[in-house]
Image: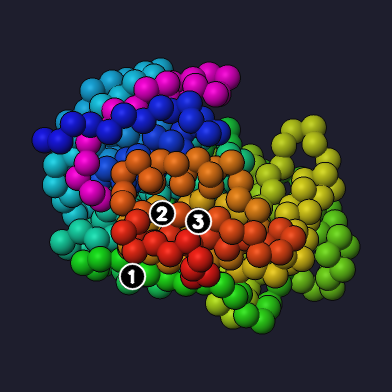
Amino acid sequence: MDEPITIDGSMGEGGGQVLRTSLVLSMSTGKPFRIVNIRARRKHGGLLRQHLTALNAAAEVSRARVDGAVPGSVEVTFEPRNVLPGSYRFSVGTAGSATLVLQTVLPALATASAKSRLVLEGGTHNPWAPPFDFLERTFIPFLKRMGPDVSCQLERPGFYPAGGGRFIVEVSPVAMLSRVSLLDRGAIRRSGCRAVVAHLDMNIGHREVGAVCRGLAWSPNCGEVTACPESTGPGNVLIVAIESEHITEIFTGFGVRGVPAERVAAGTVEEVRRYLAAGVPVGMHLADQILPLLALAGGGSFRTVAPSPHTITNIDVIERFLDVRIECKRVADDIWEITVERAHGFDSGAQG
């Protein structure tokens, strides 16, 4: 077994993403790692329930040897063996994000030797993680264009703080992920918004949708409000979809007690306006999430808005595990091109 790669969990934005990206790359490459200072930049550092679930899920899928897999741990050693496809069930047990657990194990299963089926339980609509709608309509379609066939089905949403959500994912893998270049989003085909309201006053959703349509100068027909009686607890999510020729981007806002519906909508509208003004295909959140996939594929490129701290942190972690170079180049105001290439073949003047 190789000496573990040492990762400082306080690097960059210093959150749970450093651990999750390390797990993704370790499982896919077979390289062990040791991470210290886990979530050091967070108010309550160390492993929380959702991070521990992701760690244990990665260990189960890759038959890894793990030290430090206990609540609150700030140091973990992870030594993967073989990735084994199959049927798995992972439960966060709280409103912690089940979608982040999926994103931790999915890349390895997408290049495994046979099909897999996963049942994930916990939070599906959590303000600090990609909601299920983003997985279904943005992240998974991007992964599918790299080769594997992946489907997902939401059985029950789980809002913060009650959780209780459940969804199923089926994966038909490929031997290796294919490179992708996504520099243009193409013509916008459809735009719309939807407010989902669970065990709360439906007027909240109507106010959110109205504020989005006014803020983006859309017809009121572009919005809808739906009730969610099957949810375990109360919750509210606002979803804005921009469907373009080459990609669908999802933007979300979450209702918070004491925060007016119009303010929830305003934050989402601002993010959508920025995306539309830049004219890029890849939004801020998708950018950092697809970088490990492109690195594992050996290359790729895309255009996005200015890289977020999450994106910069992911680049730092990726370059610790893989012989790749990742270049972020500003093309115009708030338009950036990110190129991933194998280090030995990297051309500093490449445009993707």
Residue 334: percent from left, percent from top: 71, 58
Q: Nearer the viewer, residue 33 or 203?
A: 33
Residue 216: percent from left, percent from top: 83, 65
Residue 344: percent from left, percent from top: 31, 59
**Mark 3 sits on what residue?**
327
Q: Is 140 in the magenta?
A: no
Q: Nearer the viewer, residue 301 or 64?
A: 301
Q: Is 33 in the magenta?
A: yes
Q: Residue at x 39, y 46 (%)?
A: 318
Q: Nearer the viewer, residue 65 or 85?
A: 65
Q: How many marks?
A: 3
Q: Residues within 10 Å of mark 2 (few under 14, many from 20)?
A: many
Q: Main secondary structure of the magenta part?
A: loop
Instruction: Please identify the quarter of the rendering in which residue 36 is found.
Output: top left
Write down the region rendered in magenta.
Answer: 28-50
Q: Residues within 10 Å of mark 3 (few under 14, many from 20)?
A: many
Answer left or right for 1 relative to 178. left
Q: Residue at x 16, y 51 (%)?
A: 84
In the image, which is nearer the foreground, mark 3 or mark 1? Answer: 3
Helix, strand or loop for disc 2: strand
Q: Residue at x 21, y 63 (%)?
A: 115
Helix, strand or loop for disc 1: loop
Answer left or right for 63 relative to 233. left
Q: CA distance from mark 3 to mark 2?
A: 6 Å
Decide if residue 206 is in sight here. Answer: no
**Mark 1 sits on what residue?**
178
Q: Amino acid at mark 1?
A: Ser
**Mark 2 sits on what residue?**
325
Q: Amino acid at mark 3?
A: Glu
Decide if residue 187 is in sight here. Answer: yes
